[in-house]
Amino acid sequence: ISSNVGRDHWPQVNCALMAGGGMQHGQVIGATDRIAAEAVSRPVTFGEVYATLFRHLGIDVNNATITDLNGRPQYPVEDHAQPLAELVNA
């Protein structure tokens, strides 16, 4: 574990398995280079993943806000990210 409390290898790329909720299954979204170090096509943000999950929970990420501890409204995803079109569009 590094001084940043991480392992410092391949931080630019992650993978996730998502299923259920009416999603379009059986696909890979995006690609990495030959050593899986960097995204080379269709990088996906965590905001897009969260927006997809919220959409399937019936939460409108474009209009929903959550009040923080200081009473300020916060959006549930950063930068108004949208759900992954590849998973939600027929």
Image (cartoon, helix red, strand yellow):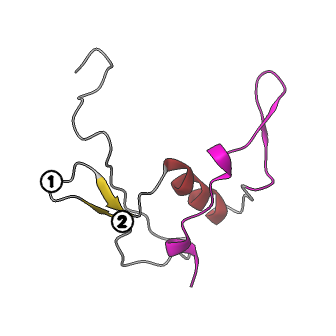
Going by the image, does 46 lie left or right of 54? Answer: left
Name which residue lies at 62% across and 54% down: 81
Name which residue lies at 41% across and 64% down: 42
Identify residue for label 2: 30
Going by the image, does 37 lie left or right of 4? Answer: left
Give residue 56's position: percent from left, percent from top. Answer: 62, 65
- First along the sequence among labels 2 and 1: 2
Q: Are marks 2 and 1 in contact (CB under 8 Å)?
A: no
Q: Assess whether residue 88 is covered by the magenta stretch.
A: yes
Identify residue for label 1: 35
Q: Which residues are magenta?
A: 62-90
Residue 13 in view of the camera: yes
CA–CA distance between discs 2 and 1? 14 Å
Check disc 2 and give the amino acid type. Answer: Gly
Give residue 65's position: percent from left, percent from top. Answer: 79, 44
Check disc 1 and give the amino acid type. Answer: Ile
